Image: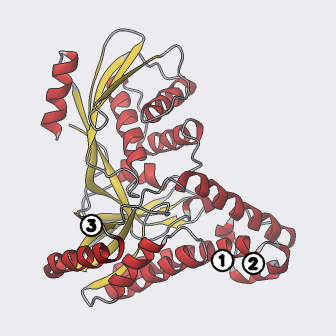
Amino acid sequence: MIQQTREKFIKIFGKEPLIVVSPGRINLIGEHTDYNDGFVLPAAIDKKIVYAIALNNTRQCHAHAVAADETLSFSLDEVKPSPGWINYLLGVVNQLQEGGHTVTGFDCVLAGDIPIGAGMSSSAAVEGGLVAALDHIFQYGLTRMEMALLGQRAEHTFPGVKCGIMDQFANLHGKKDQVMLLDCRSLEFEYFPFNFPDYKIVLCNSMVNHSLASSEYNVRRQQCEEGVKAIQVNHPAVKSLRDADMNMLNEVRDQVAEKVYDRCAYVISEIRRVQDATIFLKQGDIRQFGQLMYATHEGLSKLYEVSCAELDFLVSLAKEREEVAGARVMGGGFGGCTINLVKQDKVAAYTSYIESAYKAQYGQLPEIYVTTIENGVEII
């Protein structure tokens, strides 16, 4: 893919480009906790966006997306939101300009194999790849965390998704065969080896596009904030659900809507599960780790209500199989993938089982991805 992207760039723009590889991400546990100042446990993976990019000495930017077979252009003197994939590039350029960084005209080609809408954060990969490329070209001297925060602001302002920091963080900080415990409040992080050679991380794509996720995501965020406001009446020191516990939430159970209570109950429990998960990682206990994943799915399905029938079905299939240590919906929800920890020597059998059962139930084959944990954004 790297070579093909380079050749495509040379064919369209007639010069040699810089190549940047920007990965998708998984999150082992800690879903919808990042915007509640909690903890997450993500990793970068081998699915990626590849950029070929070079300056053009004008005030125009030209971008060709291989997947859409489309070239779009914009002026650096009028960077404003625009529909479609170009919006993610525009958001990054806007945030660089807002931060006082000089951007001159560039040409780029971007290609990738991160499935869109599958919960592997293709948007953060697009953002992270571009900001890292421009930082390298213009020598801004941004740290990886500054790049991640810039990508997050870009997503907030142009696409309008009030995401937490996890996706952009994982995209830029990933290390091969390591997962990262990120404190989304302090932005301190720690690497943990994912040292389970007998297991593979298998993603099962429900083929349900999570188009609801963006709008519902913002609703969930508002509901969490509503719960925090109610708790603050009795506990003014509570700044987010990170500071709350179930006793505090139960005190206001009659004062908040049932849905608000459920959302907050899930988040408070999930923040604790992530901390417990790191203990099991250190102990090398993948079975106990997997039980936490199942508990997370139950919470995401029943309390946070971001699953769907297809995802619940995939997790129910996983629970029937001895070779699966744990499974859950991954990402924003409403479609996309489940993440499964599967014994390596049983991956083929498990894949066949899932495909057969899912086809029988829903009339289509789910896509299955066997992933590896890789480095974050790299300048080639």
| Position of residue 43 in the picture relative to residue 93 (left or right) | left
Q: Secondary structure at mark 3?
A: loop
Question: What residue would you read off at disc 1?
Answer: 265
Q: Residue at x 52, y 37 (%)?
A: 154
Q: Secondary structure at mark 2?
A: helix
Q: Is residue 270 visible?
A: yes
Q: Residue at x 49, y 23 (%)?
A: 101
The local crowd at label 1, few if under 14, some if 14 to 19, many if 20 or more residues have their Cα within 10 Å, is many
* Mark toward the start of the polypeptide (3 vs 2): 2
Residue 237 on image: x %, y %? 78, 66
Residue 149 on image: x %, y %? 51, 43
Q: Quadrant of residue 264?
A: bottom right
Q: Is residue 284 visible?
A: no
Q: Residue at x 17, y 38 (%)?
A: 2
Q: Amino acid at mark 3?
A: Leu
Q: Secondary structure at mark 1?
A: helix
Q: Is residue 81 above or below residue 362?
A: above
Question: What residue would you read off at disc 3?
Answer: 365
* Mark toward the start of the polypeptide (1 vs 3): 1
Alpha-carbon distance for marks 1 and 3? 35 Å
The local crowd at label 2, few if under 14, some if 14 to 19, many if 20 or more residues have their Cα within 10 Å, is many
Question: What residue would you read off at disc 2?
Answer: 249
Are the two marked residues, 2 and 1, in contact with CB atoms closer than 8 angstroms? Answer: yes
Q: Amino acid at mark 1?
A: Ala
Q: Amino acid at mark 2?
A: Leu
Alpha-carbon distance for marks 2 and 1? 7 Å
Q: Residue at x 33, y 52 (%)?
A: 24
